[in-house]
Amino acid sequence: MTAELFVQYLFAGITYGAIYAIVAIGFNIIYNATGIINFAQGEFVMLGGMISITLLPIMPLWLAITTAVMLTMVFGALLEICFIRWLENPSVLRMIIITIGLSILTREAALHIWGESIRSLPYFIGDEVMTVALFGARISPQVLWVIGACGLMVIGLNIFFQTTSVGREMRACAANRRAALLCGINTRNMVTLSFMLSAGIGALAGCVMSPITSTQYDIGTGLAIKGFTVAILGGLGNAMAAVGAGLLLGILEAFSVSVLPLAFKDAIAIAILLLILFFRPHGLFGSRTAAGLKEF
Amino acid sequence: MKKLFPLAVLATLIIAIQLITGWTDTRFYLTQLTMSAYYALLIIGLCVVMGYAGQLSLGHAGFFAIGGYVSAALTTRNLEGLKDTVLIRLFDGLGLLVAGQDIYGDSLLVVTPWAACLAAVLCAGVIAWVLGIPVLKLKGHYLAMATLGFGIIIYRIVLASEVFGEADGISDVPSFPLLPGLSVSGDFGAREENYYIAWGLLIIGLVLLRNLVDSRVGRALRSIHGSEEAAEATGVDTARFKLQVFVISAVYAAVAGVFLTHYNGGIGPSEAGVMKSVRYVAIVAVGGMAHLWGAMVMGIVLNFLSLRGVFGSYDDAVFGFILIAIMLFAPNGILSWNWRGYGAMLLRRGRRRESLREKTDGLA
């Protein structure tokens, strides 16, 4: 493998990895707040892409993307308020089944609204054939947009969780819900907020990736499984480890294409998922003792 | 006697439906009822894993597909080219192969349906066993994702391998002669007998499972559902029981897959899809998790409606909706929903309002 080819694969891997990482962070935010794995996480990404594509003819690109992110956040909040907020002590099995049902309903609604056609946003700068040279590889500027947007989101989330008071309240809620409640934090609102936040970052990722990967009504399931793999790989609940794990999975997948047939690309992620689940369910970066204290 | 009564009612109903469709000349319903019965066989198997042992499986369509695809591939793929290998000669010597001619008149050498059926079911059982050892140690989200992952891998394999027909699936699967003069096939002439084969199989399956859940194993499973740690502490070998019941349900799914494939004369990759697995889970949930009869009745009703095309293009959406509605409002299934209590509550409210009105009337 030549150096140019290596860099080319590497960038393809980082692009996809960044998106997996964002989906995984979305999983983690909701998991931390509620202890639920939201199986409808991938649908947020699909909705972000689809809504912005629909809005594009009537408004400029940046406004379409902003509106799409806002609408998806409202959708996320509505899901939580309508289906999750009022349940008292639901079992894990029940929550899994409800979020699976929500993901199916969202997908089917998207199918009836937008049809089966594959759509995409235009490239933010230039067009399909425009490339920039980087370390000897030719890369579309959109790749830089994806990496930049995902990087900014990770940094922004970090600042939000570390410095703002709402972010600190959410972290308190994740650490110990009852204690947070006793400190006067409205834990129910924190849960709604966590759904909005993860819907928002998912939708933004869906917008920036749309020119490269296209958007279809059923991309959610695949992304959700990859995102979950990444979340487990990094250790469930550990948002920042998800970034490393996401890039790792993306790069592994990109290089696997040079060895295995393309049809098995998705199987790589699932094989990694199964192996991790069997041998290191606390993740690559997580600690076994900490995982033992959590309830899965 | 008490145990036999519901079965007798069911048998009467089955015969009555067949006679009614015969008189009213609506025999086409029997086709969908036959297919529903095979799906219901899978569903009662899943019901024991989900409802009694409390282990969620989102990969049961995978076992169904293993059964259907292995049997279909063995009974349709020509082994003529491999005729001189030792293995094929051994199989031929054991009477496991049958020679014939394809539509172009070329000679065809395939495995007999009986051998293919056994191989398919065995294959599913072994895979469930090997998969179950690590997977059943997991709980909650992890178990759901692991079984979902298994289902997707099976889907990818059938979609990507030539021997399973890739996106086209396998067609022209021969009929499956169970006994001389009694075979599983999609011929219009054999509609009634196939209806009875399917229901006979379902009833046998139901009786076996009911005996299982009423036995020591069933009580052990329920204790696992209640609390795995407590069950372990009282001396229940939880790992073994979970694995056993997982393998049994995989075998049920595979048997359903084999029979339905021979009945339809083919199988396609959609049978292995994730949506199918989710649908089976939805049906078990509607039937009331630990409720074999409920799961069976719902399996028949919902599959029948779906196969009749009642839901149109909203087929998957309907099952998604059912999942949410059941889990939100009646997590123990609609059959075990407290109808009487709910009715009494409404009645009480009505009375209270009436008495209130009487009082206010008196004041006025």
Image (cartoon, coloured by chain):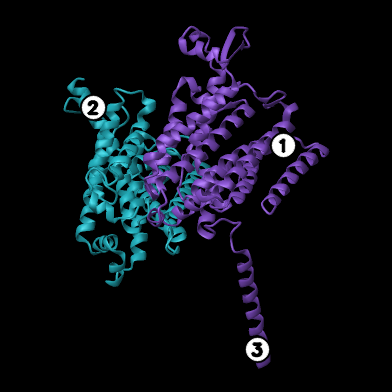
Of badges 3 and 2, nearer the viewer stands 3
- Residue farthest right in this picture: B23
Tell me if residue A19 comes above or below residue B228 in the rendering: above
Q: Quadrant of residue B201?
A: top right
Where residue A132 appears, as percent x and y from the top left, is 22, 29
Question: Which residue lies under the disc numbered 3?
Answer: B359
Please name whichever residue, B219 or A146, is drawn nearer the observer in this view of the structure.
B219
The chain holding disc 1 is B
Task: Report helix, strand or loop for mark 3.
Answer: helix
Please name whichever residue, A182 or B363, is drawn nearer the observer in this view of the structure.
A182
Precedes in sequence: disc 3 or disc 1: 1
- Discs 1 and 2 share one subunit: no
Of badges 3 and 1, nearer the viewer stands 1
Question: As drawn, is A221 to the left or to the right of B93?
Answer: left
* Res. A127 mark: none
Of badges 1 and 2, nearer the viewer stands 1
Please name whichever residue, A112 or B294, is drawn nearer the observer in this view of the structure.
B294
According to the colouring, which chain is cyan?
A: A
Q: Colour of chain B?
A: purple
Instruction: Inspect the image, locate mark 3, and give the three-letter code of the amino acid beneath it.
Output: Lys
Question: Which residue lies under the disc numbered 1?
Answer: B30
